[in-house]
Amino acid sequence: MDFSALLTSAGINIAFCALFLSLYSVLRKQPHNFGVYFGRRLAEEKFRQQVDYFSFERLLPTAGWIVKAYWCTEEEIRRVAGLDSVVFLRLFIFSIRIFSITSLVCIFGVLPVNYHGKEKAHSHIPAESLNVFTIANIREGSRMLWVHCVALYVITVSACILLYYEYKYISRKRLAHITGSTPNPAHFSVLVRSIPKSDNELLDDTIRNFFVNYHGSSYLSHKMIYRKGNMQKFVDNAERAYRNFVKVKLSAFGQSRRSNVSRCGLCGVRASSFQLYRNKFIDKKKSDLSDPDVIEAQKDCPGAIVFFKTRYAAIVASKILPSSNPMLWVTDLAPEPRDVYWSNLWIPYRQIWLRKLAVLAASVGFMFVFIVPVAFVQSMMQVDQLQQMFPFLRGVLKKSIFVRVITGYLPSVVLLLSQYTVPPLMMFFSSIEGSISRSSRKRSACCKVLFFTIWNVFFVNVLSGSVINQLNVLTKPKDMPSMLAELVPKQATFFITYVLTSGWASLCSEILQVYNLIYNFFRKCVCCYWDEPEYVYSFPYHYVVPKVLLFNLLGFTFSILAPLILPFLLVYFCLGYLVYRNQILNVYYPKYEMGGKLWPVMHNGLVFALVLTQIIALGVFTIKHSPVATGFTILLLIGTILFNEYCRHRFARIFDSFSAQDLIELDRDDEQSGRMEEIHQHLLDAYSQASNINGSKSSKNGEGPSKWFWTIRRKKHRIQTKNSLTR
Amino acid sequence: MDFSALLTSAGINIAFCALFLSLYSVLRKQPHNFGVYFGRRLAEEKFRQQVDYFSFERLLPTAGWIVKAYWCTEEEIRRVAGLDSVVFLRLFIFSIRIFSITSLVCIFGVLPVNYHGKEKAHSHIPAESLNVFTIANIREGSRMLWVHCVALYVITVSACILLYYEYKYISRKRLAHITGSTPNPAHFSVLVRSIPKSDNELLDDTIRNFFVNYHGSSYLSHKMIYRKGNMQKFVDNAERAYRNFVKVKLSAFGQSRRSNVSRCGLCGVRASSFQLYRNKFIDKKKSDLSDPDVIEAQKDCPGAIVFFKTRYAAIVASKILPSSNPMLWVTDLAPEPRDVYWSNLWIPYRQIWLRKLAVLAASVGFMFVFIVPVAFVQSMMQVDQLQQMFPFLRGVLKKSIFVRVITGYLPSVVLLLSQYTVPPLMMFFSSIEGSISRSSRKRSACCKVLFFTIWNVFFVNVLSGSVINQLNVLTKPKDMPSMLAELVPKQATFFITYVLTSGWASLCSEILQVYNLIYNFFRKCVCCYWDEPEYVYSFPYHYVVPKVLLFNLLGFTFSILAPLILPFLLVYFCLGYLVYRNQILNVYYPKYEMGGKLWPVMHNGLVFALVLTQIIALGVFTIKHSPVATGFTILLLIGTILFNEYCRHRFARIFDSFSAQDLIELDRDDEQSGRMEEIHQHLLDAYSQASNINGSKSSKNGEGPSKWFWTIRRKKHRIQTKNSLTR
């Protein structure tokens, strides 16, 4: 591929991007698309008041949304979309900062050195092969390699400094989030599983006796979790039928949307009366131990949520081994009510370690099976191989424009499409793993997709392009650096086009919400359902974060090898920052809060990218016979690993747990202000299994027993915690 | 090496063993050796009453000690030598059991199959090469490989069953030990390091304020740890001089040994008055913040020991993150007073992660440097290579008896001698790592020596025997199983002689205590110091446990490859069991208690041995073209890994921590019996830095402020915990 093919590819993409963004700015103004483009704001019902008049302006592409997205403050984003969105946007800010520095250093320092690496007559730049701009153009034993070494130092040191400050900033944000937010029922509750069953005692009594005995002063109450029995399934079905009925009625009478879940349209009975009925049913059932039904119900109980009087008592109960058998009375801090993954709570605790191992094996297996499509894509890069495989294409491939499109564009589109299967599959894997909360399921899926992406996009593409039997490479870890050093620069072309297609195009597809747009069109125009769809999506961290981290990895590894990739990446990060800000503000509704726990994952991904860059650089310097640069790179590698260890010791525990100091202060504050009584009264209602089974569907309206917790706001923000961190 | 050379080697060793054991049974009866052979019993001063008369019987070798060692009950061993000794002896019991089964299966099942593997005329057995008895004698594609596969299944399944019951048995013992022992000051105390220093507050007040504020109801008191200043060094020197003076005086007046540490001979002042003086000195010093000396003393304080009113409060304080900065207020459950490693407490906490990394790097580095002597030893196995290296040996090497001794005996003696440097070095590494207790230092050293032993004795010997550049092998993990399968049987000869020399001989040297015997001889007969030496050794788990685990590894890996090794191993384990029982009862004095925490290390070592055996078997079956056996072995491998995971989930946390249930029960028990007050009063005295700095020297006498804790015995043994475990 030569420089002009790259420009063709870039041109196509810029045109597409401009087109899509204009299209977006028009489509978003059409009222019947509000459900697609303003899902979050519709869910919060602030947007409804707009009058639906037609104006010519609605058909003009404008850039107002960019301005709005850019000027929104971080505090505002945190308020409307939670801490996780802020953390995710910090990743973009970090990327923009570090790649500005990297671009500066590499475009003006490394690129000219690469270009003039071999003394030969340079032809006209557009006709140059892209290889001329890579490190492959430097001759062996060249003295100019010190430029690359210095560039590597500058990049690593600035990345580490930026990473440190980001970690510090985000931990401070997390602590402020914990201490400054409204009282959270999750902080008072402990999930207990694997409760030992006794023949002469009701399970309910067993739990009460245990906690009264060992946590007597702080135990408040508890709530059993019941597996869905047949009767409950019947009630659920009745409830669903009733809801549909109410919905039809309401849409017929044109009443406000708001009331159709919380109030029964005709008879005035609350929807939650079904739940009360079920609770009564259960209460009646478990009165007597001689009743076989009661014994059956006992068997079905996988655990309980135990409430404590203070936050500190809850964390103590969750962290200290409760009994001398670690497989009994397993305690964990309960997830937030809206975050509980109820169907996984019914998994017997004894199965969970086995499930985790099985999922690990399945994920690794899938990673290796997926090599097949990737290798196929790589083979498309070689035109002659393509001609051999599909002889009927021979005529088409003679025209150079087609060749350019096929070699520069099509492979990564194929790769992109085949990768759409991965995130849902990994999400499924994480579900059967037995996570107790939706947020931990998403975090686990995020890690899996990250491993998958780095392996299948980066490694397999790098290795399969030139080596026939890729798996052979795995068996020689010692040769890895020099092999990578030889192969990575060769794949620069592919990855530049990958950034253009997978990166830029995915941003366009993200902002246009193609799938939802089409669905909405068919729903409204073809099927004539004119009300807004009930379902609002939560932010898909599990496939967006790995993608952004992959682009960081590409940026770091190619920075000194093939700096031409950097401007395209920088454009991606800037555009992505705006696009995702817009989407977070308008489209996605935060259904649960991870409290910034994704940052350690991102941090580790970024440090891995740095280390990989250094390993490849090590290989390059060895191949190019530059022992001094090799030595300095080894020093840098050790330094980076030490930096990561330090960060782990300094910050990681903040993201794992809460500190005694913070929790005790919060408890005292609530006790002194007399709010504690009120919190205790509302605790029992907070975790309602019935209303949360369909939580993902109904949470849009923010209704439910835990609503109270989200409406009282803590006035006093705690500065103390911040101080302790800045020390 | 042929069968007769093996018999020669075995003969030499059996003769030596018989000689040494007889010598031991004579030497132990000589009163001037009591210090060497009855250190523990002397330390407990029960042995002194024996009348020192001469009889002819003293010169006759007898086997009474074997009978005594054999008939001692486990409970008795636990009482006199602690739980760790019991756990260590359980390792021998496990080894004897599993290798009885293995020997049975392999000698009668596998060995005949190997011997008749290739259809050829067998010569007279003593002249047969040892290779005839290994799996190398089976031809490719042989149908008899199912015998090996079945044997592997029998060995693995019985090992897993035995391991499970051992783990269960030992966890029950550990729980009974925790709940049944005397009140332990360590359970009430938390070690706090990295205390934030403030300019306008004394450190003492900072600590008090923090704990009164956040653990007000359970905080009892605290004690600062001071680094040795110049003044303290002076006091220490004075104390040492005084002690020597007292000792000379006492030995001159012939007073009882007992009083020379606890009482000042002439003036009747207790030795601990020095300590009181020092404490006063410190108290006086820190009265004023404006005093520069006080500020200096503050800087020198690396932490404090905080005492709580209940055990439960202490464990809560140690497990919950105290402040939102994980690098400040670092809390750990304090080690037992006699177990505290004071000099490491003075290491700033911020250094510790760096030290750990550095030690890890140093240990790995040392492991690779050590390949050199091992490779040299291996080269001695080839007589012709030896002749090339040392031409003057040519005459000697022509005589076959010398060749037999050199090839069969000398290499492992050289290996044995060079390995004496490793345990002290690893102990040194573990010291600079920053362990806060002596027991954790020893455990860490044990793990290091274990890795070292398995790598340098097993892997390097297997690989270097045939491959010139051993490190090349490391770079091809995929070829590892088949390479091991090819090389391991070839090294059978070497490892059989290794068991004979390193194994049997080390037992003889252990029971004879050669070094101490010579030292004692010179001390008493040459230097004429007739009193018993003050120093008693604690049991050297850090090099005995890895050695026993190595022999287990050898037994498992060679079981189906070269079953001839098994009888020698079985003898080793039986003899070792008796020898170490005797040594534990008579020689070693338990200076601290690890509470059985070594068992998880042993368990992991044994499971690793099983997995390695299966990997090698996988390679063997692949080489011998037996796909069915390969498939079954993969199943077995997966099963073993699952078994290990299950054990980890079921038992590991018991060895890491205490359970709330147990601690609360203990607290209640003490409170109801009114003993709690008494315990609180003695807590402050328990941790005395001054008396424990030289703790390793003076602990022989069991004197010290914590003595009280070791003299009151808990009468009521708790059965409840046992029940919870057997559920």
Image (tube, coloured by chain):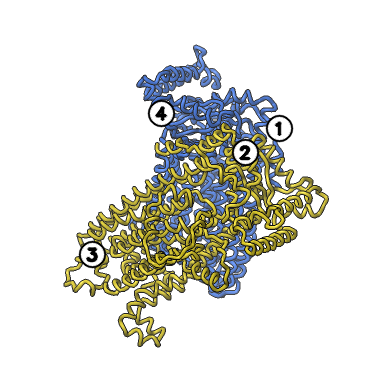
Chain colours: A blue, B yellow
Q: Nearer the viewer, mark 3 or mark 1?
A: 3
Residue B353 horizontal side relative to residue B245, left or right: left
Chain letter of the residue beneath label 2 in the structure image: B
Q: Nearer the viewer, mark 4 or mark 1?
A: 4
Q: Along the polypeptide, which appears first: circle 3 or circle 2?
A: 3
Query: Element under label 3?
Result: helix
Disc 1 residue crowd, few under 14, some 14–19, many 20+, Cα 10 Å: few
The numbered dot on residue B678 is 2
Question: Looking at the picture, do discs 4 and 1 lie on one chain?
Answer: yes
Q: Outermost residue, top direction?
A: A267
Q: Do residues under tags 1 and 2 come within 8 Å of each other at their CB atoms?
A: no
Q: Can I make out residue B171 in this image? A: yes
Q: Nearer the viewer, mark 2 or mark 4?
A: 2
Question: Which residue position holds label 4?
Answer: A198
Chain letter of the residue beneath label 1 in the structure image: A
Query: Element under label 2?
Result: helix
Q: Nearer the viewer, mark 3 or mark 2?
A: 2
Question: Which residue position holds label 3?
Answer: B114
Identity, as a three-letter code, of the amino acid under mark 3 = Asn
Q: Nearer the viewer, mark 1 or mark 2?
A: 2
Identity, as a three-letter code, of the amino acid under mark 4 = Ser
Residue B2 horizontal side relative to residue B608, left or right: left
Disc 2 residue crowd, few under 14, some 14–19, many 20+, Cα 10 Å: few
Q: Do residues under tags 2 and 4 come within 8 Å of each other at their CB atoms?
A: no
Residue A671 horizontal side relative to residue B476, left or right: right
Across and down, in percent, residue B658 comes to 52, 42
Q: Can I make out residue A493 in this image? A: no
Q: Residue at x 50, y 12 (%)?
A: A266
Query: Element under label 4?
Result: loop
